[in-house]
Each structure stands twice: as C-alpha cells, then as structure tokens.
Image (spheres, rainbow, N blue to C red):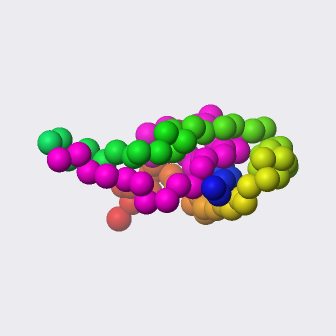
Amino acid sequence: MIFKIYRPTKSAMQSGLGNTKFWHIEVESSNSYYIDSQMGWVGSRDPRKQIVLKFDSLQKAVSFAEKCNTKYIIEMPKNGKRLPKSYTSNFLK
C-alpha cells in the first residue's frame, strides 16, 4: 500500500482558493477498476480508494504516513503564472 500526499488544485468552477488549504492523503491502489457492463460506469473493488484524509500541513501528513509504516509519494503543488487581465483590452484593436 502506498499513500499519495498532495494539495488539491482549484477547480475551474470556483474563483476562490477555499478547497486548496489542506493536504490530502489517498491510498494509491492498483488497477482494480472495472467497467459495468450494463451502464458503462467505471467502478472500483477497493473501498480504500474512497477514503481521503485531510491535514493542516505537509509535515502532519508525512508523520501520519510514517506512523503507519507505509511508503508515500509527495506531489508538490504547481504554482501557475497569473497574468493580469484588463476588461478594456478586449475592445482594443
């Protein structure tokens, strides 16, 4: 079992940074996905895939993974460039 430690990114549907403050831990499971024959939905036979733990800091998440004696992977957040945009520049030609 391997833990994946990451900070979630902002979704395209939100303008604030509300869900990006915590560090999350998920269990990296093997390819236990299957496709339902009737509906075509993708499912998983591993119930641990649904569990996500939230921590205030990266150090707390790493100490939890070490306390459980499991391997872990840390995905550092990528800081994207934010270009300042002006509404008036849409109408300049």
Q: Position of residue 77 (x, y in %)?
A: 66, 58
Which residue occupies 31% across, 48% down?
42
Residue 43: quarter of image: top left
Quadrant where the C terminus is found in the figure: bottom left
Q: Which residues are magenta?
A: 8-37
Q: Note whether residue 74 is visible.
A: no
Queried whether the magenta region covers residue 28, the answer comes back as yes
Q: Position of residue 12 (x, y in %)?
A: 45, 46
Vertical relation: 13 (above or below) 9: above
Residue at the far top: name it: 18
Judge left or right: residue 33 versus residue 36.
Answer: right
Q: Nearer the viewer, residue 14 or 8?
A: 8
Judge left or right: residue 67 versus residue 12.
Answer: right
> Which secondary structure dominates the residues rendered in magenta?
loop
Residue 55: quarter of image: top right
Q: Position of residue 24 (x, y in %)?
A: 66, 44
Which residue occupies 49% across, 59% down?
30
Q: Nearer the viewer, residue 54 or 20?
A: 54
Which residue occupies 49% across, 39% down?
47
Judge left or right: residue 47 versus residue 9.
Answer: left
Queried whether the magenta region covers residue 64, the answer comes back as no
Which residue occupies 57% across, 55% down?
28
Q: Nearer the viewer, residue 30 or 13?
A: 30
Judge left or right: residue 67 versus residue 89.
Answer: right
Q: Position of residue 17 (x, y in %)?
A: 62, 39
Quadrant where the N terminus is found in the figure: bottom right
